[in-house]
Structure formats: structure tokens, C-alpha cells
Image (cartoon, rainbow, N blue to C red):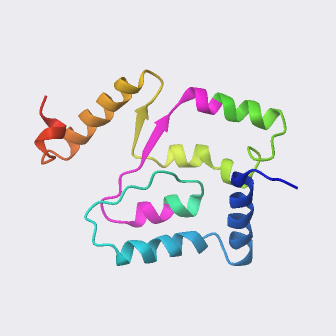
């Protein structure tokens, strides 16, 4: 029977975590980072405490919690409705991830407001950012 692609990915990831351990994907990510020559790496999604832990152990890692109340409301509604995708273990650590972040980005307004907020934070933090980004 047909299953949503997200379910297939969740099932595969969970099987790897159960077969090996919670660091299976973290180790794969660390190998990719080690091969990279990037000065800055952006991780756009954290789902598990092991991912948060490894970022905390890295030098100069900044972890942002993107606060989107609408997304949280939809997740809670999906859980109450019994949606199996929302009940997956990958959806259960959000509070720990939020508490482990260094700062919060408010994403409850218009897209332009969120972009301005991120831009101001980035430019104040990285002072030497490119002029096209930080000059107003």
C-alpha cells in the first residue's frame, strides 16, 4: 500500500537508530563535515537530542529555535487526531531542542519581518558580514 514519503524516511531513520544507536546519523553528518572545506555550516533541522549534543560540543556552534506558533499548534492538533507521522519519535524532542538553543527567531509575523530579524541578528553577531547583507 501507498505510504507518504515522509513516513518511509521516518521508518528508515528509526530503523537505523534502533539497529545501531542514536548517533548513527550524527556520525554520518560528522564525516561529511570533516570532508567539507566550508567555514560555516548551516543545519536547518534538528530532531534528536544527539544532534543537539554534538552541536553543543562543536566550537562556535549557534543554535536557533525558530518560533512558529502556527506550526506548533498544527503539530499538537495532528497528535491529538492520531496522525502517525506526528506521533513519530522524531517529533517528540522539540521542547528539549528549544531549551538547548542559544537564541530564538520569532517567525510569527510576515516573512519580511522574519527576514529582517534574521538579517539584523546576523549582522550584529558577525560584524564582518558582506555589505550587501548588512548595509541598509
Q: Position of residue 17 (x, y in %)?
A: 68, 70
Q: Position of residue 38 (x, y in %)?
A: 28, 66
Q: Is residue 13 left or right of residue 61?
A: right
- Region rendered in magenta: 53-72
Identify the residue at horizontal 52%, vertical 43% (top origin).
98
Q: Between residues 122 and 98, which one lies in front from this camera angle?
A: 122
| 120 over 60 or under it: above or below | above
Q: Position of residue 45 (x, y in %)?
A: 51, 51
* Furthest residue toward top: 109
Say which quadrant the N terminus sits in. bottom right
| 4 over 59 or under it: above or below | above
Asked if the stretch drawn in magenta spans residue 10, the answer is no
| 33 over 62 or under it: above or below | below
* Furthest residue toward front: 2
Q: Is residue 20 left or right of residue 117?
A: right
Identify the residue at horizontal 46%, vertical 51% (top origin).
44
Q: Position of residue 60 (x, y in %)?
A: 30, 59
Amino acid at each position: 500500500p501507498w505510504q507518504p514519503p515522509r513516513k518511509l524516511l521516518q521508518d528508515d531513520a528509526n530503523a537505523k537508530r534502533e539497529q545501531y544507536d542514536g548517533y548513527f546519523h550524527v556520525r554520518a553528518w560528522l564525516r561529511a563535515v570533516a570532508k567539507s572545506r566550508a567555514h560555516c555550516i548551516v543545519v536547518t533541522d534538528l530532531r534528536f537530542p544527539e544532534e543537539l549534543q554534538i552541536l553543543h560540543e562543536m566550537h562556535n556552534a549557534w543554535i536557533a529555535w525558530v518560533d512558529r506558533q502556527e506550526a506548533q499548534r498544527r503539530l499538537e492538533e495532528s497528535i491529538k487526531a492520531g496522525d502517525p507521522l506526528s506521533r513519530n519519535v522524531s517529533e517528540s524532542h522539540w521542547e528539549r531542542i528549544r531549551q538547548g538553543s542559544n537564541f530564538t527567531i520569532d517567525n510569527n509575523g510576515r516573512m519580511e519581518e522574519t527576514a529582517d530579524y534574521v538579517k539584523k541578528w546576523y549582522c550584529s553577531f558577525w560584524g564582518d558580514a558582506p555589505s550587501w547583507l548588512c548595509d541598509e
